[in-house]
Image (spheres, rainbow, N blue to C red):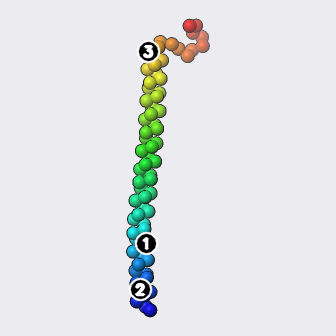
């Protein structure tokens, strides 16, 4: 009976270590995906901002309400 208990304890330890590694890998990849998505959204937003500024410069118009068109 002691051998069965020891075997089950060893098996539980193996599952704990392997499961921990798998959990760390899953969390790491999820964090990487979240960071990649946030970076993509930020880059797109920056490109929109620069595009809008270039558009306003090339259009030559102003948002100043005192300036008549």
**Residue at 46% in and 37% down:** 42
Choose the circle earlier in sequence order: 1 or 2. Answer: 2
Q: Which residue is mark 1?
A: 16
Decide: marks 2, 3 in contact (CB < 8 A)?
no
Q: Quadrant of residue 63?
A: top right
Q: Sort mark 2 into few (<14), some (14-19) or many (20+) by Cα contacts within 10 Å.
A: few
Crowding at label 3, few (<14), some or many (≥20) Cα neighbours within 10 Å?
A: few
**Vertical order, 26 against 17 (above or below):** above
Give residue 1's quadrant in the image: bottom left
> How many C-alpha atoms fall within 10 Å of the one at disc 1: few (<14), some, or many (≥20)?
few
Q: Residue at x 43, y 81 (%)?
A: 9
Determine the residue located farthest toward the bottom in the rendered image.
1
Quadrant into which the C terminus falls:
top right
Q: Residue at x 43, y 29 (%)?
A: 47
Residue for badge 3: 58
Disc 2, SS? helix
Label 3: state its secondary structure.
helix
Disc 1 + disc 2, Cβ < 8 Å:
no
- Check whether the beta carbons of the residues at disc 3 and disc 1 lie within 8 A of each other: no
C-alpha separation, residue under disc 1 versus residue under disc 2: 15 Å
User: How far is mark 3 from mark 1, CA to CA?
Assistant: 62 Å
Who comes first in sequence, dot 3 or dot 1? 1
Residue 16 x %, y %: 43, 72
Number of marks present in the image shown? 3
Q: Which residue is mark 2?
A: 6
Residue drawn 44% across and 57% down?
27
In this rendering, is residue 67 above or below 47? above
């Amino acid at each position: 009976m002691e051998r069965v208990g020891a075997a089950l304890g060893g098996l539980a330890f193996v599952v704990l270590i392997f499961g921990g590694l798998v959990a760390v890998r899953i969390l790491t990849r999820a964090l990487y995906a979240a960071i990649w998505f946030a970076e993509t959204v930020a880059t797109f937003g920056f490109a929109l901002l620069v595009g809008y500024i270039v558009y306003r410069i090339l259009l030559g118009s102003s948002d100043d309400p005192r300036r008549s068109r």
